Amino acid sequence: MSLWSSRSQHPGWPMPVGPLRVQSGVVGLRPVRLRDAAQWSRIRLADRAHLEPWEPSTDLDWVVRHSVSSWPSVCSGLRAEARKGRMLPFAIELDGHFAGQLTIGNVTHGALRSAWIGYWVASESTGGGVATAALALGLDHCFGPVMLHRVEATVRPENAASRAVLAKAGFREEGLLKRYLDVDGAWRDHLLVAITIEELRGSVAASLVHSGRASWT
């Protein structure tokens, strides 16, 4: 067992993933950390209009929830779940700078070997392949070091940009979840998409490279 995996109850954490070069720059994943507070808060507050329509509703005001002082408890909670083997919370880096988050959750081994994956990227970093590269790296990590068989995601049918990213990574639609989640103040339908290890051709990142959407660094 490696030093990385011996520190937690499941493989693949804490471990950096990548990098992969896309149009916008070099993309990598690494565990979230407490010193991400300022960048996380700045992006989340500036991108409220970009992010809030797609995220679960809460009783807390957006500004309060995304203040710098809120990050330590958020980060500690994420890392606690990682230590318990239930989650892998990554920061997405673009050219070495915090540019979003990618989270692998509900990690289950045994006969199921499954998880869900979700992500967000700063609006200033969208459109240049960052989300696609981060998702590809996350999936390869799931099917490699984390040793999963299936990864799923949910997305609102109206979210064309995110649906395109998921499609590029090889996800297929499995069905429509009616009134699945309270998002932006109402119960919203979500598409369920998934991918299993049998559907890969080598790796997701390699497929992006072969298609000309990315390159190795």
Image (cartoon, rainbow, N blue to C red):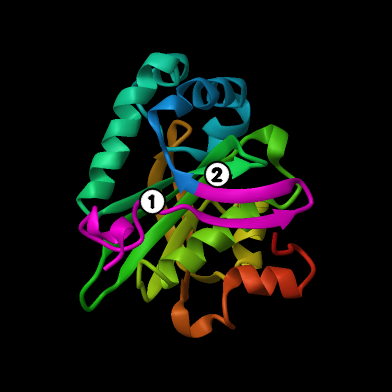
Q: Which mark is residue 180?
A: 1
Q: Above or below — where is 201 with respect to 54?
A: below
What quarter of the picture does the N terminus occupy? bottom left
Q: Residue at x 46, y 64 (%)?
A: 141
Can residue 192 be seen at all in this image of the molecule?
no
Left or right of residue 35: residue 159: right
Element type where label 1 sits in the image: strand
What quarter of the picture does the C terminus occupy? bottom right
Amino acid type at circle 2 is Ile
Q: Above or below — where is 166 with respect to 44?
A: below
Magenta segment, which residues? 1-29
Question: Label 2, label 1: how many angstroms apart (C-alpha)?
Answer: 27 Å
Q: Residue at x 76, y 46 (%)?
A: 24
- Mark 2 or mark 1, earlier in chain: 2
Q: Residue at x 65, y 42 (%)?
A: 94
| Image location (x, y in percent) of residue 199 | 52, 82
Q: Could you say which is closer to the camera, residue 3 or residue 67?
A: 3
Can residue 37 be seen at all in this image of the molecule?
yes
Q: Above or below — where is 185 with respect to 114?
A: above
| Image location (x, y in percent) of residue 216 | 70, 64
Q: Provide the residue designation for mark 2.
A: 92
Element type where label 2 sits in the image: strand
| Image location (x, y in percent) of residue 163 | 62, 57
